[in-house]
């Protein structure tokens, strides 16, 4: 390995990454790939303690429980991560929920829960790491949006609005962080083979796959590879972008 390559390797091994919703599905694969590349990784979760503990035991990745929709819980959680691992260099805002239903049947609770967890969480988490990133002149923020935030989706006005908001949030914050080497990008996954998608009725799933030009669902690893590119030290000229990883289903 060259001296320059060794220097990059050493830097990567000292970087701390936080992945929200990082103990299951896409988030778990992102956390694994970051760890395998030498980053120190913290994965957050909120609901399923058993699954999170099993993931941590299997992967060796530290897990932390807090509600990303609650600013004070995020504040305490980030403080604990930084005490355990060091200052946060990379943030992957992946946590998300669904509360599907058409607008004329949706109550405020279903709307608000999705917007707070999927969108306000990006503010909460970014606000708590941005000062440190700016002070150290390095940061990589990757926000996980959605194809449904680009194209819309019947029965998901709350989810589509929150994910679309993530794309706008990303572009605005990218402009604020650029001069300090803090890049902010988004990834908009298409339909990925996760527990959430597997729960869709078989006939509906067949129709979804038929609408994907590459002829298959995405894999969590497809999304994680995009995160790895954007998280790299040498990805500093990429900011304010949305990477669509959807098998050609929607070209935005």
Image (tube, grey):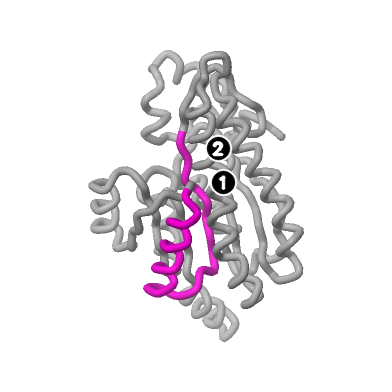
Crowd band around label 2 with a 10 angstrom C-alpha radius: few (<14), some (14–19), many (20+):
many
Q: Is residue 205 above or below residue 178?
A: above
Residue 182 in picture, x, y percent from top left: 66, 66
Local secondary structure at mark 2: helix
Placement of the C terminus among the 4 image quadrants: top right
Using the image, tell me which numbered label, if any, was put on residue 120. Answer: 1
The residue depicted at 63 percent of the width and 72 percent of the height is 138
Which residue in the structure is indicated by mark 2?
Answer: 115
Q: Quadrant of residue 63?
A: bottom left
Using the image, tell me which numbered label, if any, was put on residue 200. Answer: none
Q: Is residue 114 above or below residue 16?
A: above
Residue 243 in picture, x, y percent from top left: 64, 46
The reply to whether discs 2 and 1 touch (Cβ–Cβ < 8 Å) is: yes
Question: Which of the marked residues, 2 or 1, is nearer the chain's N terminus?
Answer: 2
Q: Is residue 172 above or below residue 245?
A: below
Q: Nearer the viewer, residue 108 or 56?
A: 108
Crowd band around label 1 with a 10 angstrom C-alpha radius: few (<14), some (14–19), many (20+):
many
Q: Is residue 192 left or right of residue 157?
A: left
For the residues labelled 2 and 1, the Cα–Cα distance comes to 6 Å
The residue depicted at 24 percent of the width and 58 percent of the height is 57
Tell me the magenta residue range: 70-97
The residue depicted at 62 percent of the width and 48 percent of the height is 186
Residue 245 visible (yes or no): no
Q: Nearer the viewer, residue 40 or 114?
A: 114
Residue 226 in picture, x, y percent from top left: 56, 51
């Amino acid at each position: 390995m060259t001296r320059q390559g060794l220097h990059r390797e050493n830097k990567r091994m000292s970087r701390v990454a936080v992945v929200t919703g990082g103990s299951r599905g896409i988030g778990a694969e992102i956390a694994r790939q970051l760890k395998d590349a030498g980053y120190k990784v913290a994965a957050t979760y909120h609901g399923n303690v058993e699954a999170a503990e099993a993931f941590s035991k299997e992967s060796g990745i530290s897990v932390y429980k807090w509600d990303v929709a609650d600013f004070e819980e995020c504040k305490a959680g980030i403080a604990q991560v930084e005490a355990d691992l060091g200052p946060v260099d990379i943030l992957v805002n992946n946590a998300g929920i669904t509360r599907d239903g058409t607008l004329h049947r949706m109550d405020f609770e279903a709307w608000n829960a999705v917007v707070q967890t999927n969108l306000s969480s990006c503010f909460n988490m970014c606000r708590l790491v941005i000062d440190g990133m700016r002070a150290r002149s390095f940061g990589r923020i990757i926000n996980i949006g959605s194809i449904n935030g680009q194209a819309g989706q019947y029965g998901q006005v709350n989810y589509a609005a929150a994910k679309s908001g993530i794309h706008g949030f990303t572009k605005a914050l990218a402009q604020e962080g650029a001069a300090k080497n803090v890049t902010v990008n988004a990834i908009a996954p298409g339909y990925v083979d996760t527990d959430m998608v597997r729960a869709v009725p078989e006939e509906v799933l067949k129709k979804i796959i038929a609408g994907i030009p590459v002829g298959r669902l995405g894999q969590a690893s497809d999304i994680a590879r995009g995160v790895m590119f954007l998280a790299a030290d040498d990805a500093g000229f990429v900011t304010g972008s949305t990477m669509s990883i959807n098998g050609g289903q929607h070209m935005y």
